[in-house]
């Protein structure tokens, strides 16, 4: 099949709107100018409703992992204890980060595809009452599951511990309430629902986290959030050279997001997720996380005995449709369809249509068109 | 004067060619694909001649300061001693980085505008023979001066110490010989002669540096160069999400650089620098670093008693021409004209022409046209 036109349904990077690509293709400006300051200030302000916070949102020239590292090294010290939810690849990363910087991480193990239960966090606090923070993903990209951040926040608040949340596949996808949920450090990245190329991370800190950061002695320089906050809030520029084009692009993408309206943006993501899940059901396929599926990415189990790696490769190389397979223990067993950012519910006809054709190709016993029809039916109900 | 068209002569960010802007405006691709791997491999290979190395060049999603941090934390441990050249704002940054991570930095103080003398490094080794590394800028952007990296390398080699070099305004500007000069860690950034927006740093390590990095216990995660090297060299992708668009843009800008030819690129930068210096002389203006001027940026002293801040602001706001003023002790006293990347010698007619008009505006006693004529004369001699 000819496929000059390509389709990106990976859970990051996600498609970038032409308006944003063109904004970033404008001649570069210097980062110590009123013009840049205006874009920086506006972009940071426009981020706040997506975070559900009145705190300052700090921009960093790094990918999301850099933002996760910044949260850890600005809020915890070597030798301090922290509880982290490991329900997938990114939860595991919290553990690696804590270990790399000399903190003592206590793992709350969650089966892949499941949500962490607040009771598990309670138990961890009982076992390790000295824990100063809980680290969790709002949405775990590797398993396509969401964790109950608000409930986990209640537990950590009762214990006087900080709540550090990775919102990389949740901010801009579904409603986030940083202040209401008591999140102390909230991290996201540019390449998902924010509709930008990778290369920009965002971190917001609560008032309490700011106080903690002032006392923390963990060595840091590039990711010194207090220095960065001072520069961005007080001097309207970045501490180091700014990722000028990404920040101007962010300002543009946030303009587009707010023009659509946040409730509409969240409803669109929900609809894309529902349509994709309906398609899976219609095809007789199971989800990895049926009870708590993420609105930004849907994880569909490849029928037993078939090769998911071959499926993903066929979709990409023969149909021009990029989705993602499973990682680690789910390698070859999972296909992940991202539906974040610059995508419309109609695009799910392509994602699901290609998936059906790929499944047929690798020998699955499915009915061509069943999934696509389910997508249509779901979209029709939303009119 | 109307100035819809703007001119960027700052020493970073420097102008980005339209071809590169458009390359980066192409639809985003995923970073675990053969298409991305091909761009990454090619970009990394195309960097080597600019570094003068056969070592692997590692790309990082950060600005140049992140690259400097990566060099420090991968090669030195807390408590270890290092000598650093402080001849300006970026030399000072080495000192801050060393202090932030618990190393003991020994400053070699160099007057702003001067070059470090190899004898000063010898003296520092005599006073602190336990020093494990020398850190220096190949070109100090704040003073527009170059340091003699090859000679400093001889001294550090004799002492068995590592040589860590910031090449942020030297790589791609004039010939760099990492291997011949014995550089162990060589850092640069995307937003200068590499003709890209900010957001990408590059670090290459010598074989010796790689051995050291393997033994170093300094905590690191996002900037773990061994992990990053393994991913980029062996798996043809990045350890964390790749700054896809910047890396594809880098590959394009390096294609343009190699099509022009490195000797031609270096000659062009030299000619722009010479023309700018000739203009300063013709206007009776002095340079901050007359004996060792950088080929990438020229620092011209503002005549005594006049306000350099006002000059820079007038050029930008009234003429649409961005140059940079002085930092710290040189604030208001210096104007820095960058001539790196996507600029041609003819562009110096604009930079110098605007400078003359700005100087008149703030009350300088200069002859309008004298500098421009000097630029013309220098260009004419190069035909």
Image (tube, coloured by chain):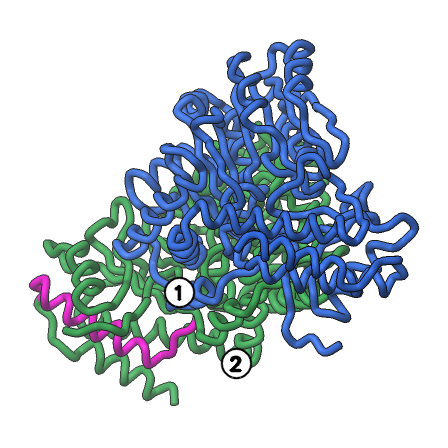
Chain colours: A blue, B green
Toward the right, the furthest residue is: A305
Q: CA distance from mark 1 to mark 2?
A: 18 Å
Give the main secondary structure of the magenta stretch.
Answer: helix
Q: Where residue A4 appears, x then y in whole percent? A: 66, 76
Quadrant of the frame with the C terminus of chain B: bottom left
Residue lying at 16% horizontally and 66% vertically, measured from the top left: B318
Residue A126, horizontal then vertical, whole percent: 66, 9
Q: What residue is at 25 percent from the left and 62 percent from the top?
A: B300
Residue B366 placed where, x, y %? 11, 71
Query: How many numbered badges does the structure rendering display?
Result: 2
Mark 1 — on which chain does it sit? B
Q: Quick check: B178 above or below B162?
A: below
Q: Position of residue B1 (x, y in %)?
A: 14, 73
Q: In the image shown, does A104 or B154 lie closer to the viewer?
A: A104
Q: Which residue is mark 1?
A: B14
Q: Which residues are magenta?
A: B342-364
On screen, residue B267 versus residue B258, left or right, reads: left
**Residue A214 visible to an observer of this rendering:** yes
The 10 Å Cα crowd at callout 2, few under 14, some 14 to 19, many 20 or more, is few
Q: Is residue B101 magenta?
A: no
Q: Quadrant of residue A346?
A: bottom right
At mark 2, the secondary structure is helix
The answer to whether residue B65 is left or right of residue B33 is left
- Is residue B358 part of the magenta span, yes or no? yes
Q: Are marks 1 and 2 in contact (CB under 8 Å)?
A: no
Nearer to us of marks 1 and 2 is 1
Question: Along the horizontal axis of the image, is B305 left or right of B13?
Answer: left
Q: Which residue is mark 2?
A: B260
Identify which residue, B374 or A45, lies in the foreground. Answer: A45
Q: Badge 2 sits on which subunit?
A: B
- Residue B371, by quadrant, is bottom left
């Amino acid at each position: 099949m000819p496929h000059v036109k390509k389709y990106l349904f990976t859970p990051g990077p996600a498609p970038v709107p032409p308006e944003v690509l063109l904004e970033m293709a404008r001649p570069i400006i210097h980062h110590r100018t009123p013009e840049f300051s205006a874009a920086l200030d506006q972009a940071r302000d426009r981020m706040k409703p997506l975070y559900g916070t009145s705190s300052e949102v700090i921009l960093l020239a790094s990918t999301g992992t850099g933002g996760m590292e910044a949260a850890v090294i600005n809020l915890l010290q070597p030798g301090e204890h922290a509880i982290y939810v490991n329900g997938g690849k990114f939860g595991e990363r919290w553990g690696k980060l804590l270990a790399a910087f000399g903190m003592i991480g206590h793992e709350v193990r969650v089966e892949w595809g499941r949500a962490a239960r607040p009771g598990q966090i309670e138990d961890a606090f009982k076992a390790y009452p000295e824990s100063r923070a809980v680290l969790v993903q709002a949405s775990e990209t590797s398993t396509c599951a969401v964790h109950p951040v608000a409930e986990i926040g209640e537990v950590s608040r009762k214990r006087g511990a900080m709540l550090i949340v990775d919102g990389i596949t949740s901010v801009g996808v579904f409603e986030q309430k940083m202040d209401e949920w008591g999140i102390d450090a909230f991290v996201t990245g540019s390449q998902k629902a924010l509709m930008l190329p990778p290369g920009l991370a965002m971190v917001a800190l609560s008032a309490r986290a700011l106080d903690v950061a002032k006392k923390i002695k963990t060595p840091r320089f590039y990711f010194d959030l207090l220095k960065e906050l001072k520069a961005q809030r007080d001097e309207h520029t970045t501490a180091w050279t700014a990722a000028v084009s990404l920040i101007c692009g962010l300002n543009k993408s946030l303009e587009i997001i707010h023009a659509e309206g946040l409730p509409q943006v969240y409803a669109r993501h929900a609809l894309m997720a529902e349509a994709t899940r309906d398609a899976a059901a219609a095809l007789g396929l199971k989800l990895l996380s049926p009870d708590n599926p993420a609105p930004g990415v849907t994880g569909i189990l490849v029928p037993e005995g078939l090769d998911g790696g071959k499926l993903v490769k066929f979709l990409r190389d023969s149909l021009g449709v990029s989705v993602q397979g499973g990682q680690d223990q789910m390698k070859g067993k999972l296909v992940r369809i991202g539906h974040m950012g610059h995508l419309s519910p109609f695009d799910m006809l392509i994602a699901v249509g290609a998936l059906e054709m790929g499944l047929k190709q690798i020998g699955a016993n499915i009915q061509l068109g069943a999934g696509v029809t389910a997508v249509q039916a779901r979209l029709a109900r939303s009119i």
